[in-house]
Image: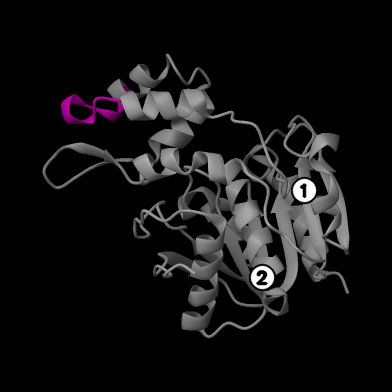
């Protein structure tokens, strides 16, 4: 059992409680746009997970620890049952929590992620970020140019560079705990240890153009989510909420508000 960290968070709106967990290299900043819309009908809790954003860093980084963090956060905020939404790594963290503390999850939404094992696909990202000469870096634009060799996609570079900030001493640094993320990467790819059925209503949202939720990732663990539904958002890749926000929000609001 790990020691929970005190997660940095923001809260918007009033209504049923909806907690949102970001993905690898992300932060709550990535969800402010969708959250403003969801806040019309829900009280939205945006969290920075451990080793990300403005939450504390820890050498311990695995899904059980993330589940402990979330449980402790709900306790501190006096929250009982909540709706829970997670994207990518955050989706696995959400599934892990729901399997461990089922009575605390009213409805679960998992964006473009399954509970099974995945093959590595972030080698270039890690290489580019780890090799960036932070001590000699002069500007964010210089960092963007240096990342191009290992991260050719402009939108991915933009996403990653949201982690970059200038410390008080003027030196650039990563907000995410990059060495620990790299050391823990194989664990993040592994299948979740879900031993029994998960009964909360669950919606898996797949991006049409993404392979994260294809047939190879719908095995025995996927079937553990007894009351599951699947929705596919057209013309969207892995970042469904960013690529097709209107369609994504329409689908999840319908799911969360249905009887």
Residue 33 shown left or right of residue 7 in the figure: right
Q: Residue under label 1, please give it.
A: 205
Q: What range of the chain is rendered magenta?
A: 132-141
Q: Quadrant of the C terminus?
A: bottom right
Residue 138 included in the magenta stretch of the image: yes
Look at the picture and state if 50 lies above or below 75.
above
> Is the image coloured rainbow, by chain, by secondary structure, or in one colour?
one colour
Q: Residue under label 2, please give it.
A: 100
Q: Secondary structure at mark 2?
A: helix
Closer to the camera, 88 or 160? Answer: 88
| Residue 48: x %, y % from top left | 45, 58
Residue 44 included in the magenta stretch of the image: no
| Residue 72: x %, y % from top left | 49, 76
Q: Secondary structure at mark 1?
A: strand
Look at the picture and state if 221 lies above or below 156.
below
Q: Is residue 36 visible?
A: no
Look at the picture and state if 10 lies above or below 216.
below
Instruction: Decide which of tag 1 and tag 2 comes sooner along the chain.
Output: 2
Count of numbered tags: 2
Residue at 43% in and 30% down: 126
Residue at 67% in and 53% down: 192
Residue at 53% in and 29% down: 122
Residue 69 shown left or right of residue 177 in the figure: right
Residue at 54% in and 39% down: 186
Q: Is residue 15 visible?
A: yes
């Amino acid at each position: 059992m790990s020691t929970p960290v005190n997660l940095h968070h923001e809260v918007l709106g009033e209504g049923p409680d909806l907690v949102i967990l970001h993905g690898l290299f992300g932060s709550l900043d990535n969800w402010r746009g969708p959250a403003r819309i969801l806040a019309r009908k829900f009280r939205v809790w945006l969290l920075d997970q451990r080793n990300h954003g403005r939450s504390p860093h820890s050498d311990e980084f695995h899904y059980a620890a993330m589940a402990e963090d979330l449980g402790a956060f709900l306790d501190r905020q006096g929250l009982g049952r909540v709706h829970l939404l997670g994207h990518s790594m955050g989706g696995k963290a959400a599934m892990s929590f729901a399997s461990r503390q089922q009575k605390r999850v009213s409805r679960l939404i998992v964006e473009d992620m399954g509970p099974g094992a995945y093959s590595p696909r972030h080698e270039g990202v890690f290489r580019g970020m780890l090799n960036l000469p932070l001590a000699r870096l002069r500007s964010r634009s210089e960092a963007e140019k240096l990342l191009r060799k290992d991260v050719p996609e402009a939108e991915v570079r933009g996403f990653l560079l949201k982690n970059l900030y200038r410390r008080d001493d003027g030196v650039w640094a990563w907000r995410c705990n990059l060495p620990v993320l790299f050391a823990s990467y194989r664990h993040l790819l592994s299948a979740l240890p879900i031993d029994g059925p998960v009964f909360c209503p669950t919606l898996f949202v797949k991006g049409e153009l993404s392979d994260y939720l294809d047939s190879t990732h719908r095995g025995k663990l996927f079937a553990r989510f007894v009351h599951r539904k699947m929705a596919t958002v057209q013309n969207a890749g892995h970042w469904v909420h960013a690529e097709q926000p209107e369609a994504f929000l329409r689908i999840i609001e319908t799911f969360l508000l249905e009887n």
